[in-house]
Image: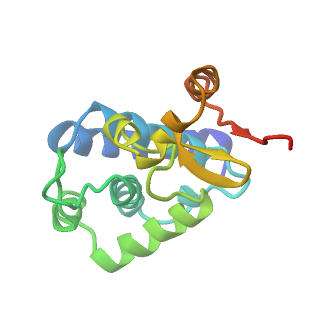
Amino acid sequence: MSKNNLKERQQKLQELVHSFCHEKLDQDYSQLCEKLISKMGRKRDVPFKHGQLNIWAAAVVHAIGSINFLFDKSFEPYASVSDINNFFGTSGSTVSQKSKKIKDMFRMGYYDSEFSTGMMNQSNPLNNMVMVDGFIVPLDSIPEEYQQMVKEARAQGRDIEFRMDR
């Protein structure tokens, strides 16, 4: 497949996902799905090179949604797996298989710093923890100057841990 054809497929995939996110979800999900599709498009073996784009679109939404509790009614926005499959006209088992393939490919999981929604990043229970000498401790248990270092590092997308010399 030529690069132009691949870019065209990627654009169509983006459009499908954007239409679902616009109708059922929000801008945060739309941006995360776009980011995931772009990252998939940069792989040596582009996953959506073959297969039906509606299945890939559903799988992208499913992958992002599954790590952000999209299927939990207590979270907003909420959509069920059936909502995704009905919108894209897909089968649940096929979509979940492709979704798993995507999540494995990018090692996606709960509270994934790259693919979590803003709300999930804010509610991450590990935000208030830091590693000191190999132990996870509450951030507020270390001196204020170190707390500030942790906050600055995390604001830059990095993490930090401390070793205390004895």
Residue at (66% x, 42% y) in the render: 3
Q: Quadrant of residue 135?
A: bottom right
- 26, 44: nearer the viewer: 26
Going by the picture, which residue comes out furthest to the right? 166
Residue 30 drawn at (x, y percent): 34, 37
Q: Is residue 98 left or right of residue 19?
A: right
Q: Is residue 15 left or right of residue 138?
A: left
Q: Can residue 11 be seen by looking at this rendering?
A: no
- 16, 103: nearer the viewer: 103
Residue at (42% x, 59% y) in the render: 56
Position of residue 121 relative to residue 109, above or below, is above
Residue 61 drawn at (x, y percent): 35, 53
Label count reads 0
Residue at (44% x, 65% y) in the render: 99
Residue at (55% x, 25% y) in the render: 151
Position of residue 75 relative to residue 56, above or below, is above
In the rendered image, the quadrant that contains the C terminus is: top right
Going by the picture, which residue comes out furthest to the front? 166
- 131, 25: nearer the viewer: 131
Q: Is residue 100 left or right of residue 61?
A: right
Residue 55 drawn at (x, y percent): 37, 63
Q: Quadrant of residue 160?
A: top right
